Image: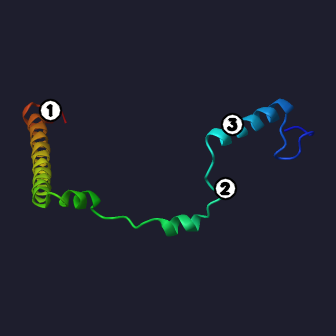
Amino acid sequence: IDAHHTRRNEPIHPEFERIERSEVKMADRFFPNTMPDFIPEDSLIAEAPPPVEGSLTRLLYLPYKSLCQLLKKSALELKDTVIIIALVLVFFIGCMSIWHFVWDGEYDNY
């Protein structure tokens, strides 16, 4: 903004003013803006519904409660199995690296 345009909303060039006016008219004509200019933050917090815990589980319970419980039980068992397999695999790899370190002669170099 140069010295001639000191007001904040004043356009810098007359051509820009013409474009801005036509865009506003076109936008309001085809897509009316129904949003308010300002929304206080307190109203957003007050209107927000509290989060529902387990909403997906609750929705699945509606028609097929026993099937949902069976799927949940199977998923938890699968998770436990994967964790156990991962721990055994890490232990096995650690033992093999120690075995190679000691018996392949790398220990003698230290």
- Which label sits on residue 37? 2
- Which label sits on residue 26? 3
Label 2 element class: loop
User: Which of the two discs, 3 and 1, labels the residue nearer the N terminus?
Assistant: 3
Position of the C terminus by quadrant: top left
Examine the rendered structure and indicate whether residue 57 appears above or below residue 83.
below
Q: What amino acid is found at the position of numbered circle 2 in the picture?
A: Asp
- Please state which of residues 11 and 37 is positioned toward the viewer in this rendering: 37
The answer to whether 69 appears left or right of 32 in the picture is: left
User: Which of the two discs, 3 and 2, labels the residue nearer the N terminus?
Assistant: 3
Q: How is the image coloured?
A: rainbow
Distance (Cα) linking label 3 and label 1: 79 Å
Q: What amino acid is found at the position of numbered circle 1 in the picture?
A: Glu
- Please state which of residues 45 and 79 is positioned toward the viewer in this rendering: 45
Label 1: how many Cα within 10 Å (few below 14, some 14–19, many 20+): few
- Pointer 1 residue: 106
Distance (Cα) linking label 2 and label 1: 74 Å
Query: In front of the other: label 3 or label 1?
Result: 3
Label 1 element class: loop
- Please state which of residues 86 and 64 is positioned toward the viewer in this rendering: 64
Whole-percent x and y of residue 9? 81, 45
- Marks counted in the figure total 3
Q: What amino acid is found at the position of numbered circle 3 in the picture?
A: Met
Label 3 element class: helix
Position of the N terminus by quadrant: top right
Distance (Cα) linking label 3 and label 2: 19 Å
Labels 3 & 1 near each other (Cβ < 8 A)? no
- Which label sits on residue 22? none
Q: Residue at x 82, y 30 (%)?
A: 15
